[in-house]
Image: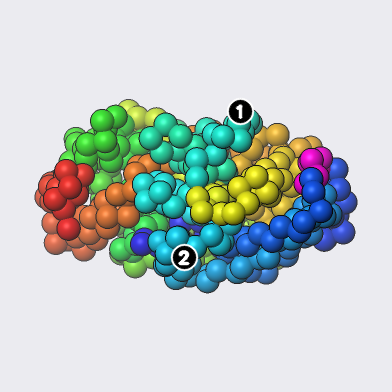
Amino acid sequence: MEQRTRVKRGAVGVFSVMIFTATLAGCGSTQSSGSKTVNLVFATQGLGTEAQATSQAVKEFEKLHPHIHVQIETLSASSNNAYQTLVTDLNSGSATPDVITSDVIWPPTFAAAKWIMPLNRFHPNMSRFFPGMVKAGEYQGKLYAMPWFINVEGLYYRTDLVKTPPHTFAQLVSDARTAMAANPKLTGLAFEGNKYEGAVTVFQDVSGGFGGSFLNSKGQPVLNSPQNIRALSWLDNAIKSGLSPKAVTGWEEGNVQQTFLSGGAVFATNWPYLYPLAEQKGSQVANKVGFVPPPVQGGKPTASLGGDDLVINKNTKYPQQAWELVNFLTSAKTMTARALISGDPPARTDAYTSSLLKKAPWFKQEEAVYADATPRPVTPLYPRISARIQEALSATYSGQLTPKQALDQAQTAVKAIVSGHGG
């Protein structure tokens, strides 16, 4: 399984547990009937303020549902380890965990394996959730996952160096060059270029801006399209021309974070968690940060989607009670309260209340980027597809292959995977 793309937040919540509890008290939900206590197991990741937020939400849920007890099973912070634990449990046919936190790229794999149940039977109202998150939780026309919180990759820029955010990739280069001419120590564009999932999301951001995609509407690979070749050439040229340092070929989110927060970059690709860190007291870039969708050059703004969903084990003994928990955790008030504690951006529009935006104003700019949230291919084959794309990006950035050669090879490999003959 590929590396988790919902970045763990380093920012702390902006309110206390007392405020969290008071906010959740207003969340209405029907109490469970009957006197028998039902025990649910909720498998989830999250440490620090995320764990605190989850614990408080579960306590409030139990107050409203006195006959439902929720046991929190904390999964490994490592995405690979957490995924393997879940695969082992679900593949065995175990009835627990009943409710599971899922990375946005997992539901199609779980659904194809018939490990999780379709949620349409509960008639959820999805009108207030960001469309990209909803789409990521669908498989073969059915909804399998409820969005819990959203994460999108956007473009950070220094507002003191760039007066208006660039709308095209050409303008990004021009603005970066101007700033670098005034201060040669600056990095023009910091981005994640290591051989891992983060490099794929950056490539998707740029690919979409040039009008490209990984799969077409029929699910067939189009990796070596002219648009994708232009997109990869642009990223490769950023390295070879000095707009980005050669070191980005080994950079992940933490490296980009360090460079941008230290004041060393004009532009940077990263996720929403970076914003509150940039605005912390003592930050080198406090009050000098903007966050917008990636630019375009003949395509459309494409902000790669990350985040977490909630899914229900198909073999749970308590489907209705499991749904009650999922429904509570994904309500607007619960999401708002979670955001105040953990910094996790809500996955529904009505959770962005005036109170939230007053206490955490950076959510206003982040919310604007969510409109362009774009899922990676929603298919159980995605982890294998991503691995081939990673190989193509690495071969290009290291100079082993040209962008066209690398994407031609990736196209051949992914075509075999999609047709059922790939390794």
Q: How many marks?
A: 2
- Residue beneath disc 1: 127
- What residue is drawn where x is 14% and y is 61%? 400
The residue nearer to you, when weighing 173 against 93, is: 93
* Residue 293 visible (yes or no): no
Q: Which residue is mark 2?
A: 89
- What residue is drawn where x is 55% and y is 62%? 96
Whether the magenta-drawn stretch holds residue 188 is answered as: no
| Element at label 1 | loop
Residues rendered magenta in the picture: 27-32
Residue 223, how many percent across, how many down? 21, 42
- Measure how far apart labels 1 and 2 are at the Cα level: 32 Å
Q: Which circle, 1 or 2, is nearer the viewer? A: 2
Task: Return the x and y of residue 333 as percentages of the image width and height.
Answer: 76, 43
On the image, the x and y values in percent for residue 305 come to 47, 45
Mark 1 / mark 2, whichever is N-terminal: 2
Q: Is residue 250 above or below residue 411?
A: below
Q: Residue at x 57, y 43 (%)?
A: 146
State the image coordinates of residue 224 (x, y, percent, origin top left). 18, 41
Evaluate whether residue 34 shows in this view: yes
Q: Is residue 119 above or below residue 262?
A: above
Q: Is residue 357 found left or right of 167 in the rendered image?
A: right
Q: Is residue 257 above or below residue 216?
A: below
Please name whichever residue, 347 or 206, is drawn nearer the observer in this view of the structure.
347
